[in-house]
Image (cartoon, rainbow, N blue to C red):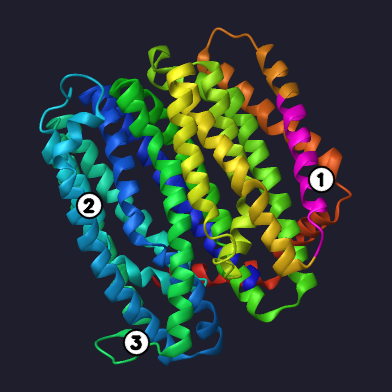
Amino acid sequence: MRIQNSLRNMFFGVAGQLITIIMGFIVRTVFIYTLGIEYVGIEGLFTSILLMLSLANLGFDTAMIYSLYKPLAEGDKYKIQALMNLYKKAYRIVGFVVLAIGLSLLPFLPYLINGKAAPVENIQTIYILFLLQSAVSYFFIYKQSILIADQRNHIVSKIHSAFIIISNSLQILLLVFLGSYILVLVTQLSFRVFENMYIAKKVDRLYPYLRGMNKAVLYGEEKKRFFQDLYSLFLYKISGAVINGTDNILISMFIGITVVGIYSNYLLLLSTLTTLLSYIFYSLTASVGNLIVQNNREKKYHIFRVIRFSNFWVYGLCSICLWVLLDPFISLWIGEPYLLGSIVVGIIILNFYTTGMQGASTTYRETTGLFKKGKYRPIIAAGINLALSLILVSIIGLTGIFLGTIFSRLMVYFWYDPYIIYKYVFNRPLKEHFIKYISYTFVVAGAGLITKLAANQIQTNHQTLTLVLMGMLCLTIPNLIFYLFFRNSKEFNYLSSVLRNLYQNKFLKTFSKKYHIQNEKS
């Protein structure tokens, strides 16, 4: 059942994200040609500011999802009601805090943009609409947590896909015929509210005991333990916001808003790919949480190794594809003036790879509740990131900002997350993890070099044909090398057997039959 739920979540998550990718590229292309790169830069800057404001979230989402695993598995409706009541009250407070802090930043906006004046009109109105879009979602989004914890995230994915198609189509029409960014933002805000309200209604139908008012509350040790976990998660939240949210702000302050716009195009591709991959791996989170509650240590360790191996194969392949294809794609898409330097692009891809390779450790840290172990280390990571980025940007420019992000992650998370998991979950020596990590990285580097050299030999008179041929090499060479190196590994054989069984077993038959029947009825 865990595998079935995970794959159902993956299928609809990936399908939904593919829709988002297509619509996102169309909207961004229209955006650039109708409004200009400065508006893209402003959007990237404000998105980063709101990411910093999401600190008010305090990690409630992760703490709540973790807290729901056990009562959902045991069918404890009272405790589920108590947790959801707590979550509802907390997120109302969060919404008002985000709104208040966001409004207090209005006078400081000019100082966050390099230059004497902002190159975009109505800058404060644009910022307020961004802020409202972030703040109002907190009043409804809390109900999604029970779907995620109950391994039913595919429901959210399907609803989100429908709203994305309608919302983005309307945005394109507004950009083409009216060229109004304000109306685009109002549209985004409206659809965000409607989507969250619709999901909340769906949750009420699926879990009738959550409808209306009830007086269920947490008491004593349970409430104390929840807030202890929450405090530890808050520290991780600070680190994540600083590490991921300060890059655009620093670029805007020290280099310029136009460069933020150029980098935002790369970030669109990377974040889209990251979100797509996160649907695949995040779909496993609730299943791992269920596994942690029910199964033994050897099984936990085995699944960890499989997820780590999957991280290597997927993120390694994607990193190689990005290294070879990213600049040619940007050049074909919007032109050479929007390219960053090859060194900067290489550093950005290295950051993508190291983040992705943390996936197994992050999943197990969150699902095992090891929030309190090393809880102050995220603060150290955030401090290292900010200090190094500020120092290096003045020495080597844009590259220094991204190097600060990578170094802070490697100096803290790279070794500590696996350390606590191996010590408190697996009770095994940590050496095995690093041997695997290094071997995987060497294979990725070697496969990437071979693929890059092969791709450089392709010479045609058509950019599109060149990109397609390069893409074929990227999909062929790395996968072949990975297979040759790891075809006899336990992790590869396990994944192969799972895929074979899924192809043959009744899950796929039941899945296809279910939707065939639904289509006949419709």
Q: Magenta stretch: dominant SS?
A: helix
Horizontal side of residue 218 vs 489, given as left or right: left
Q: Is residue 512 visible?
A: no
Q: Amino acid at mark 1?
A: Ile
Q: Amino acid at mark 3?
A: Pro
Q: Which of the 4 quarters of the picture holds residue 261?
A: top left
Magenta-highlighted residues: 428-448
**Are dots 2 and 3 in contact, CB under 8 Å?**
no
Q: Where does residue 486 sit, x and y in percent of width and height?
A: 84, 45
Q: Which residue is mark 2?
A: 133
* Viewer-side label of 2, 3: 2
Which residue does the numbered mark 3 point to in the structure image? 208
Residue 102 versus residue 147 in the image, above or below: above
Disc 1 or disc 3, which is closer to the eye?
1
For residue 435, the mark is: 1
Of pointers 2 and 3, the one earlier in the residue sequence: 2
Circle 2 packing at 10 Å, graded few (<14), some (14-19), many (20+), is: many
As helix, strand or loop, the secondary structure at mark 3 comes to helix
Crowd band around label 3 with a 10 angstrom C-alpha radius: few (<14), some (14–19), many (20+): few
